[in-house]
Structures are given as C-alpha cells and as structure tokens.
Amino acid sequence: MAKFATSPPDITHMPPGIPYIVGNEAAERFSFYGMRTILVIFMTNYLLDMTGSPAPMDEPTARAWYHEFVSAVYFFPILGAVVADWLLGKYPTIIGLSLVYCLGHFVLALMEAPQWVGLEPRTLLVIGLALIAVGSGGIKPCVSAHVGDQFSTRNQHLLSQVYGWFYFSINLGSTISTLLTPKLLELYGPGWAFGVPGILMVIATFFFWLGRHTFVHIPAAGNSFWKETFGRKGRRTIANLIPLYVFVAMFWALFDQTGSSWVLQANDMERTVVAYETPVSADGPALSVRVLSLLLSPVGEEGTIERFELLPSQLQAVNPILVMLLIPVFSYGVYPLLGRFFEVTPLRRIGIGLFLTAIASVVPSLIQTWIDAGGRPPMNWQVFAYVLLTAAEVLVSITALEFSYTQAPKKMKSFIMGLFMLSVTLGNMFVAQVNEYISEMQKQGSRYLDGANYFWFFTICMALTAVAFLIWSQFYKGQTFVQGDDSGPTP
C-alpha cells in the first residue's frame, strides 16, 4: 500500500481520482439496474423448469423474491464495510467483490441453458442472485466512502457537488439499462438480457482498476477499528443514526416497489407512445419537428408517424431520468429558495422528503382503484407519481448518504455507510414479509390486501412514519467528521 497515497492531498480543486469513481459507478449501475429491472417480469413470464416448460411464479411470490433479493443486496454492505475498514481497505475490497459480482451475472445468463450445468433454472436464479447480492452489496459502502476519502478539509466544500455527480452517474447508467434490458429480454431472451449487464460489470471493474494510482487509499484500521466502532464515540454515533435509518427504511419500502408492484400495475395501464410531426413557423423553409408524446387520449392519424408501446418494466426509466434533471434543480434552485425562509438542514430535507413520499404513494393507490373498477389508466398518472417520488428520493436518499458520511468518525466511514444501507434491507424485508403473508392468505382463498388496498396500506405506513420522524428530528444531536479532521460543528 506504500506506493499509493494514504491521505488526501492538500488541494482546493477536485481530486484526480473522482472521474474513475464516477465512470465506474455509471457502468456498475447499468449492470445492477439492468438485471433488477427485468427480474419481476422474468420470474412471472419467462422462468422455465429443467425441461424448458414454463414455470412462472405468481405475483405475490415474485414480489417477495424481488424484495428479499434487494434486502440481501443491502444487508451485505455492513459485512463489506467491516472487511474494508478492519482488514483489507476499501480499494482491495471493491476489486475482489467486483469479481464475485461478475460471476453472479454469468450464472444468471446460464438460466437459458440449464442443461450445460445440470441445474434447475430456479436454482441458478438463487445462486446468481446470491452472488450478485454479495458482490454488489459488499462494494456499496466502500465505493460511497471511497468518494469521501478523496477529500481533505481544504476541498471539503466540493463534497456535496461530487455526491450529486456520483448520484447522477448512478442514474445515467440506470436510465440506459432500464430502457435497453427489457428489449433484450423480449427480443433475445434471458441469456442476453442477463449477459449484457454482466459485460458492463466487467468494464466497470476494469475502469476502477485503471484509477488505482490516482486514488487516495485510506489504510484499514486493523483492530483499532473495533476499538473506535464500539468505543464511546462510535457507540454514540451509531445510537444517533439508528433511529434515522429506521425512519428512512419506510421510504425504501415504498420506493423499491417501483421495481415490483409498480411494474405489475403498469401491465394494466395504457403505455402507448406516439411519434408525430408538428409544423414550426419560420421565415425560411417550412420546418417540422418530430415529437414523442405520451398518449393522453386518442389521437387522429393526421401527422402521426408511428405508435409504439413501452414495456411495463421500461417505465422505471422515468425515475433515473428525473433524478438527473432534479439534482441540479434542487441544488441550484429549490435549496437556495427555501434557504431564504429557513435553514435547510439535512434533517429538514429528509423530513420534507418523507412527507412527499406519502403524497407520491397516494397516486398508485388511486391508479389501482381505477384499474380495479375495470379502467385502463394512461401511464401519465404513473409518470406523475414518479415525479413526486423522485423529488422525495433527492431529498431523502442523497441527503442521507452524504449526512451518514459526515456523521461517521474517520475509521468507521464504510461501516456507517453499511449501517445506512441496512435501512434498505429493513424496508424491503417489510415488503417481502407482507407479500409472503398475502401469498399464504391467497392459498387459503382470502383476498387480503388485494388490489388498491395493497397500495393504501403502504401509503398509511409512510404517512405515520413521516409524522414520527418530524417529532424525533427535533431531538437529534450529532457531530461532523471529515478525513484529516476528527472534530467539527454539530450539524
């Protein structure tokens, strides 16, 4: 490790390793979200048995599997964080677990040809998802903390900007894969649909390796990690943050249903997109502009070039597109505007986001009520729900990510990031348990939490959580820590 820098350089500009981290994150997120985007559709429509005959899951079971997988992905960060902060350091942990990640994608791609390995596709699904959960989950806290490790007190003011770009890269990769991977599944089958994200993961690993000489490599703390983590300062930090993560868990319980219940709901919605030409007034030659429009109502054939229907899983692309648009809107517009009236602290941002999540959840509840009555709502309504939920994501997720890093003493940065990600596990386990209970009740002939009641249940849970957070946040006390400075003002 001696050949690498072990402390941030004394600079005021952007650290040189940041482009490699951001580029790696874009490719890795293409890999993860491409696979995750098609998972529910694959399990309910494409899953086969060993003979090649269809063996799909029912919807509650598929939703439970999906949320159990997401729970596992966000459980392993705490283990990856311990390995990184205690034994190996962040960079070696990221490289090693990335190889496990790549292997998981390869196993999923084999589901189209199970006879090659003599295993049932459902068994290969379990193995592949387990490997991806270990690899993807294990590197998550390390990458997030590795970003912060590149900064010293002199360029700390750029940290918020970089976390914004870090999140932007996540959503750039997610957007492309969310639009592309469902078409790969539809046109070429599971082999290519799961294989292409695996190729992107290999590229992400290689790109991260290229930046090894530009990174700051904070050494593993060794046994002092345990002393700091469970010492007075560490215990106080953990005790301060655990209630926050319990509240944020309910946000993830609703947000991650965009990959499960929202996709299944989109099956029953009008998803037509119309491409048409519209004339543009000009002094010169006549001009026309080709426009893509969501189909709000029946459109005449005049001026229409073509119509096509989005796949249910492709609607998820709305979220990362909106994130890329809303990050600068909030950073340079909303936060400065609100700052004229009150101090926009991290906890206030999170609180506003939790209430906005409850409002966003009302929309799919109303959509499902419409569907239950025999209607076929246009997808614009789900797009509107995505707008509200994505605004809440910017307020809650990005803020909580940055806040977690700044609240952690320097030897336990990855550990606290892993602890933060357990909030995702907690939220998804809650959803998985609800769906497993629904599946059991259905086997007994009950229609427990059927239709719109399913969505209203989570809406009520979110509203109660937001109120509880508002009360708790008035009593939070913490301290800010950055690399090179173990003391700071109370946030």
Image (tube, rainbow, N blue to C red):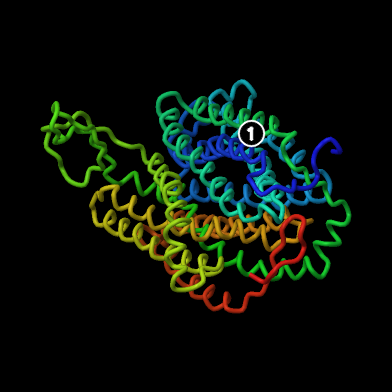
**191 over 135 or under it: above or below:** above
Which residue is located at x 59 percent, y 22 percent?
A: 115
**In the figure, is residue 86 to the left or right of 435?**
right
The quarter of the picture where the C terminus appears is bottom right
Percent position of residue 349, x then y:
51, 65
The residue furthest right is 223
- Please tell me how crowded label 1 is: few (under 14), some (14-19), or many (20+) other residues with Cα within 10 Å: many
Q: 257 or 356, which is in the foreground?
A: 356
Which residue is located at x 47 percent, y 42 percent?
A: 40
**195 over 344 or under it: above or below:** above
Percent position of residue 4, x then y:
80, 38
The quarter of the picture where the N terminus appears is top right
Numbered-mark total: 1
> Is residue 76 among what the camera can see?
no
Which quarter of the figure has residue 332? bottom left
Say what secondary structure mark 1 lies in. Answer: helix
Mark 1: amino acid: Gly
Which residue is located at x 63 percent, y 49 percent?
A: 72
Percent position of residue 42, x then y:
47, 36
The residue beneath circle 1 is 104
Which quarter of the figure has residue 109? top right
Percent position of residue 161, x then y:
56, 51
> Is residue 22 among what the camera can see?
yes
Which residue is located at x 44 percent, y 50 percent?
A: 258
